[in-house]
Image: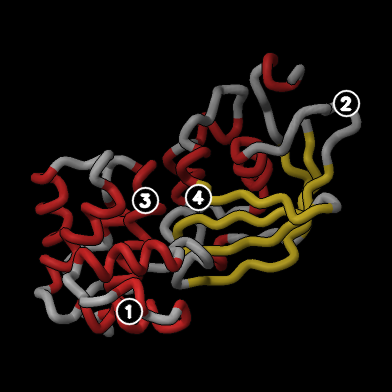
Amino acid sequence: MKFHIKVNSAKTIEEIENYWSNEDYSKLLELFSFPDANTIKPENLREMLFMAITDFEPNEAAATVLTYKLSESLNEGQIAQISHDMLIDKVCEEYPEIELHCDLFSINQLLYKAYNGTFLNCKATLVNFEIEKPGDFKGEITKEIVLKSFNRGLSDSNIIKRLFEEKMTTEARFEQAEDILWKLNDEGNITFSFITSEYWINKDEIIGSEFEGECLLAEAETEA
């Protein structure tokens, strides 16, 4: 099954827009013992949070933000380890549980900006593209379909192609696609965008601007 792909743009980004809400900033300010956090104007919350964070040691601040965001996924020991590892490694690229990479990226970047570089600067890739379905396909565009269809447009050095060759090129289910692509947005009129880690797809690895993406899906999916 072929999905026609046209890449409109691919760029590197350092944060995911709207990942953090004003409510998040307010709650974090309270966790960092900032007085009267609920009285701060919304436009000043982020700046005040950065000030509050830097009153703490970097690993302490990391542990606080990790606990706030990921306490349901990580135990205290894991949080303590990650809070130290983040100072020397790109944990959001290397952590074995890839379903946490998106959250770890945004936590890392919040701390990176607050401490002005103490943490490593991690990056993501935002791709805007058009995808045309074949006439006999009635299902929805999924992350799995997008990744498999992009196979022909990525350089052979791309790590997804190297690690998941079988899942990218056969009918095998590609469950990891859900976590590799952090966000997939329908922009309307066959236009979509996705965000993923630069680790998974660097903008320079997208070597095709328009191509026929070969996408093999399990029979049950093609009938959906």
Q: Are marks 3 and 4 in contact (CB under 8 Å)?
A: yes
Whether 70 is drawn above or below 63: the answer is: above
Q: Residue 113: which numbered mark, if any?
A: 1
Mark-to-mark CA distance, 3 and 1: 18 Å
Q: Are marks 3 and 2 in contact (CB under 8 Å)?
A: no
Q: Residue at x 47, y 45 (%)?
A: 180
Q: Within 10 Å of the Cα at label 4, are there few (<14), some (14-19), or many (20+) other Cα atoms?
A: some
Quarter of image, res 41: bottom left
Mark-to-mark CA distance, 4 and 1: 21 Å
Q: Earlier in the sequence, mark 4 or mark 1?
A: 1
Where is residue 108 shown, x and y percent of the image? 30, 65
Q: Earlier in the sequence, mark 3 or mark 4?
A: 3
Q: Within 10 Å of the Cα at label 1, are there few (<14), some (14-19), or many (20+) other Cα atoms?
A: some
Q: Residue at x 56, y 51 (%)?
A: 183
Tell me the mark number nearer the camera, choosing from 4 and 1.
Answer: 1
At label 1, which amino acid type do we have?
Lys
Residue closer to the observer: 116 or 18:
18
At label 4, which amino acid type do we have?
Trp
Q: SS for tag 1? A: helix
Which quadrant, please, contains the N terminus?
Answer: top right
At label 3, which amino acid type do we have?
His
Q: Residue 32: which numbered mark, if any?
A: none
Q: Which residue is mark 4?
A: 182
Whether 175 is drawn above or below 102: the answer is: above
Q: Earlier in the sequence, mark 2 or mark 4?
A: 2
Q: Earlier in the sequence, mark 3 or mark 1?
A: 3
Tell me the mark number nearer the camera, choosing from 1 and 2.
Answer: 1
Q: Earlier in the sequence, mark 1 or mark 2?
A: 1
Q: Which residue is mark 3?
A: 101
Mark-to-mark CA distance, 2 and 4: 28 Å
